[in-house]
Image (tube, rainbow, N blue to C red):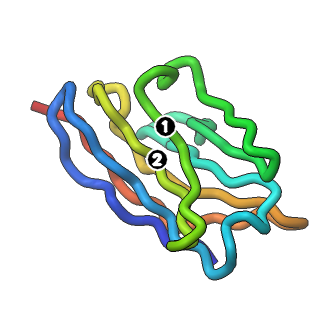
Amino acid sequence: QLQASGGGLAQPGGSLNLSCAASRSVFTFKVMGWYRQAPENQRQLVARVTAGRSTYYADSVKGRFTISRDGAKNTVNLQMNSLEPEDTAVYYCYAFLGSDYWGQGTLVTVSS
């Protein structure tokens, strides 16, 4: 249902763009978003967008990350700028439409 891509290694201050391809129109989901899980930490919500186009960002990423949906490609994207070592985690895309849907994780490592 959901296929995530775009993780990798970035230097502090750098950028990465994560993409999550859906098997149906991204505008049919009530909610789409990104979570992350760092080693020994719980999975936490990073950003989400609703069908009504409202967005939410965790305080730790506000002003640095931007979530968006691409209807032509059926993807939900997370543009990550000004990356910090604390952003290192496995990132998971998520969608809700009656049930929860999860993509496989993609690893983001921020290190010099």
**Amino acid type shown at disc 2:** Leu
Query: Is the C terminus in the top left, top right, bottom left or bottom right quadrant?
Result: top left
**Residue under pointer 2:** 78
53 relative to 24, above or below: above
- The image quadrant of residue 1 is bottom right
Residue 15: x and y in percent read: 26, 39
Q: Residue at x 58, y 56 (%)?
A: 69
Nearest to the observer: residue 18 or residue 110: 18
Q: Secondary structure at mark 1?
A: strand
Labels 1 and 2 touching (C-beta < 8 A): yes
Q: Earlier in the sequence, mark 1 or mark 2?
A: 1
Q: Residue at x 84, y 65 (%)?
A: 97
Q: Residue at x 52, y 34 (%)?
A: 41
Q: CA distance from mark 1 to mark 2?
A: 6 Å
Circle 2 residues within 10 Å: few <14, some 14–19, many ≥20: many
**Residue under pointer 1:** 66
Nearest to the observer: residue 35 or residue 31: 31
Is 8 positioned to the left or the right of 57 in the image? left
